[in-house]
Amino acid sequence: MTGHPEISIIVPVYNVMTYLPVCLDSIIGQDFTDWEAIVVDDGSTDGSGEICDRYAKIDSRIRVFYQRNAGVSVARNEALKMARGRFIGFVDSDDWIAPTFYSTLYRLITENDADISQVGFFREYPKRSVPIYDRPHLMVIGHERGIREIFEDRIIHSYTWSKLFRREMIDPEFPAGVFYEDFSVLIQWFGNADKIVLSSEPLYHYRMRHGSTVHEKDAFIEYCFFMAVKARVEFMRTKGIEGYNDEVFRRKLLDAAVGSAKKVARYAPDKKERRKYIDLISREIRGLMPVGDIFGKRKKALRVWKLAWHPRWFEFTVRFSYAFEVLRRIRHHEIYR
């Protein structure tokens, strides 16, 4: 292929040979044809690389690169360096896209002279599909509201794959060596945008499967989520957006801290690792005390206080209550089965 394509589609690959053909077939099947797909194999050991090579022979628009296993962020960043398109899209290698996915995103972003376009998606479970944003709706929003909406993570979710970006928006690059890298960085990309256009039409198929990052119960992953929330809050503090004050930011951080620390306490099997990440979260929130102005005398205020100043007590009470709940469910099942 000569010249520069309009869209560069970035596909990081790691041990997804079961799902990869469906993903690449869906890209080849796009009714928008002026694209290149930059497929980066991140040290796969299951035969995914051979599938990538086979598809590169089928369609010259697919460019395949290999790297030692370094994580999805490094794979995406390397692909960005090689991308030649005016616009950048992302597809996860275990998902697939509708034939009109990129034609719709491209039409939205060009006709509205926007910087970022977004469509809806399906959550794909083994036996059912759940549409998200399934009602016909089109919305064009400006810079400040775009930042508000991605911070709230409701109308605009912090996923790269449902969107198309002018390549100038993609700054900074993905942080390496962490999880929730898109959740951390996307708010900054939206901070670069003057206009965002949103469609409710679901055109991306997001596969819900065990083994993906969002379904792993891992202490480091939960810690990364909390630190990503912290990065988003720190970015919001610099914007000075009306309605977002210190109380809002403290509540957001403390809710994330308690949520992540609870999951670590409940599910992380290794005591040393469990306590390491609970302690790290604990130290991060001590400067946010006291919390009576946010939570009053409610149960949550006590929980936050325990996490900040008595993390072992926090860990014990969470694990005890979780064990009690598991036992209650077992007994309920035995009685009523």
Image (cartoon, rainbow, N blue to C red):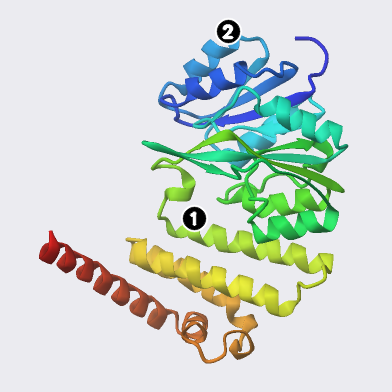
Q: CA distance from mark 1 to mark 2?
A: 37 Å
Q: Is residue 232 visible?
A: yes
Which residue is drawn at the image coordinates 84% and 69% (left, top)?
240
Amino acid on which the number 1 mark rests in the picture: Ile
In the picture of the structure, the residue carrying the numbered disc 2 is 58
Q: Nearer the viewer, residue 43 or 50?
A: 50
In the picture of the structure, the residue carrying the numbered disc 1 is 221
- Disc 1 versus disc 2: nearer the observer: 2
258 in relation to 151, above or below: below
Amino acid on which the number 2 mark rests in the picture: Ile
Q: Earlier in the sequence, mark 1 or mark 2?
A: 2
Q: Residue furthest top?
A: 57
Q: Nearer the viewer, residue 83 or 125?
A: 125
In the rendered image, residue 107, in percent from the top left (x then y), is placed at: 78, 29
Which residue is drawn at the image coordinates 73% and 66% (left, top)?
234
In the rendered image, residue 285, in percent from the top left (x then y), is placed at: 59, 77
Kindly state the secondary structure of the residue where label 1 is placed: helix
Kindly state the secondary structure of the residue where label 2 is placed: helix
Image position of 46 (left or right of 259): left
Quadrant of the rendered image containing residue 84: top right
Image position of 122 (left or right of 216): right
Which residue is drawn at the image coordinates 48% and 16% (left, top)?
50
Quadrant of the rendered image containing residue 166: top right
